[in-house]
Amino acid sequence: MEIMGCLQMRVLITGGLGFIGSHVAERFYKEGHQIFIIDNLSSGNPENLSTPYKLYSLNVESSKCVEVFNSHKFDVVVHLAAQINVATSLENPFLDAKSNILGLNNMLNLSAKYGVKKFIFASSAAVYGMNEHTPINEEADCNPLSPYGMNKWLGEYYCKKFTELYGLDTLCFRFSNVYGPRQGTIGEGGVVSIYLERMFKDQELTVFGDGNQTRDFIYVEDVADAIYRGVDAEYKEVLNLSTNTEKSVNELLGIFKELHPIKGVVYREARKGDIYRSSLDNTKVKRQLDWVPMYSLKEGLTKTYEWFATQQQKPPREKKEKSSRRLFSFLKPALPYIENFVAFGIVTALTIGTQSDIQSYQLDYKLIYILVISMLYGTRQSILSFALSSLLFLGMSLYNGRDLISFIYDSQSMVTLAAYLFIGIVVGYTVDRKNSEIKTAKIEAVASEERNEFLSEIYNDTRLVKEELQSQIMNTEDSFGKIYNITKELDSLEPELIFNAAISVLEQIMRSKSISIYSINKYGNFLRLTAKSKVTEMQLPKSLKVSDFPHLQQLIDSQSLYINKALDQAIPVLSAPIMYNNRIIAVVSLHHLPFENFTLYYQNLFKVAVELISSSLFKAHRYLEATQSERYIEGTDVLNEESFLTVLDSKKQTKIKLNIEFTLLVISNSDIQIEELSNKVSSFLRETDVIGKGPDGRYYIILSNSEKQDAAIVTERITKSGIIPIIVKEELLYA
């Protein structure tokens, strides 16, 4: 299965506006894919993501998610939405299960139903419980201590069963302690963000325990890269995602002290249930995904610190609620009672003021008061108005000289009170019923309106996608093919293979068979031919001195695209630098281009293509740096057998595809020590040449872009040092 071979994938990321989700979204977007996000914004923040995306503000367990899946037909689903607070899961297991089980189940079901090609689930190291036999591998027993860990473990089982029952391709990652920019203070890796937040507030840092407890901290961009690589993985079970290193809290504090003044550190008693040592074995994920973590703890913490420092410079947000609005909100429930008592006060004044007026006395203000209050507020206030009116009636009667006993036996008084009660209850009940019906109708109307708006949004999204696809098909000629070639052919971790692929890609994109790539030495004064188009009429020098070519000097000084506006036939039409760590490592040139194609469009196309090649080489060089100890024999510049054969194979492919020669030498000294060989031979070789150990136990030298006559000169120089190299006439044979 090759999902990444798709021209452009539709990627759904649940929790995509959160800490990890926003980095994952950026990673996929940079690779040219379309991003969709489901996030209820409980912890996610739209400010976390600046790249284009389509947001659906929903809970992952919502039934509305079916419309999202039905509308877009996603290629990949990355499920990161979760309740991540362990303490919350202990206090409210139902809430944790609702998000972490029901939400996952909904996403799995919809993914299987709508043909998602890859489903990636974010699990956690919490599934292992108190296991301190570090590093913990995937086969270790799981014994989670909280509902959060239990539900993550159960989530892995759900993924496994959906693969078996429905054929959904799933992959689960058990994250170690993830940290990085945009992280909140809740979750397993939150200690980093908690400390940084307190540092910038000039507060003391608290350590629970002696500070020697360890955790396996992994930078969030390494996590995002592994998830991206996991899309194409054939592996369908569980992988630890970690650095496989234990770092203590004290080491963490030591790095923080280098970055920012710390007011103080307070050590307190260790918390009950805390794991003392924690580290996950990442051997399997490196092998299955061809992935290694690129960031050391210091590099990651520095980038995280810089982000937090930037956040501190932003002005504080204005409060959404003003004090007057808060006061009104507080008084709103009491408003009916206040108005009721005010109305009663008016009625009392009118009653007392007109009690001597015989004609006015026939008008019962209390009955009108009960009727009005009942019509306005319903039964609750009508009962209160009846009670107040009854007290007023009784008070006025006593005031006029009647005694309480005669009042009880007075049938006319009882009829008056009964009339008050009847009017209040009947009118109040009628109003309550009417208000209830109106409220229900409003709720249904709002729900219908929300659903119509949601469906209209889905419809508009679908229509826009359709129109965009039609526009691309009608107007973009071969842009899909270009993107496919670049993203697919440049997917390698060997610089030699990337150079080979770059020639092929540029030939197709630029419609020219005159591409060359020269690598530049570390001093920036000489270029060596590394790859070129395989055409006999294109004869190029094997090396160039920068000072002899003004256009090269200009390109190196400006570190930008060079355009041959004078159309000088002695130099390339277009040349662009390939950068690594702010240094030019190679120059890509287009030597010939039809005049009608010498346009701004092709100039920009060439520039973008070279930037993509630079990006691939950057990843390749970072990979080689990260795996240097695994490629070279310890303490030497000599490649081990596996790495040497890989380089040799890439040289052979370069010769076949691009007609770039190389020469293979074998060291005939049988008793030579490897350290002596490395020290003596390395000084005679260029940066593109290598020494390595062959499968027969002998040592070999590969001279890049060298024919037999060139190799004879190098051989003569090496021989003077006491090392005797011999040109191999036949290819190295290996099983």
Image (cartoon, rainbow, N blue to C red):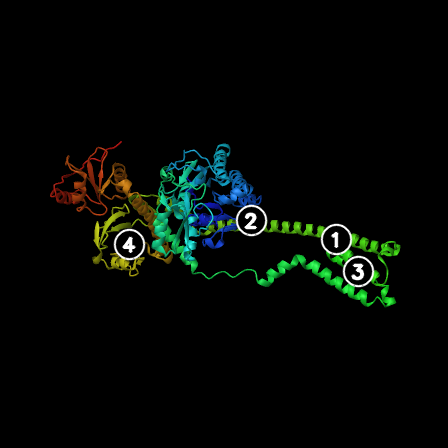
Q: CA distance from mark 1 to mark 3?
A: 20 Å
Q: Are marks 2 and 1 in contact (CB under 8 Å)?
A: no
* First-in-chain label (1 vs 3): 1
Q: CA distance from mark 2 to mark 4?
A: 47 Å
Judged by depth in the image, the label closer to the viewer, 3 or 2, is: 3
Q: Which mark is residue 379?
A: 1
* First-in-chain label (4 vs 1): 1
Judged by depth in the image, the label closer to the viewer, 2 or 1, is: 1
Mark 2 crowdedness (10 Å alpha carbons): few <14, some 14-19, many ≥20: some
* First-in-chain label (3 vs 4): 3
Element under label 1? helix
Question: Please, what is the three-letter code of the amino acid marked with disc 1?
Answer: Thr
422 horizontally vs 705: left or right: right
Element under label 2? helix
Question: Please, what is the three-letter code of the amino acid marked with disc 3?
Answer: Leu
Task: Name the quarter where the N terminus is drawn.
Answer: top left
* First-in-chain label (3 vs 2): 3
Q: Are marks 1 and 3 in contact (CB under 8 Å)?
A: no
Q: CA distance from mark 4 to mark 1?
A: 81 Å
**What percent of the width, then of the height, locates residue 211?**
38, 46
Q: Which residue is mark 2?
A: 458
Element under label 4? strand
Q: Quarter of the image holding residue 281?
A: top left
* First-in-chain label (2 vs 4): 2
Q: Which residue is mark 4?
A: 583
Q: Which residue is mark 3?
A: 392
**Is residue 295 in view?**
no
Q: CA distance from mark 3 to mark 4?
A: 93 Å
* First-in-chain label (2 vs 1): 1
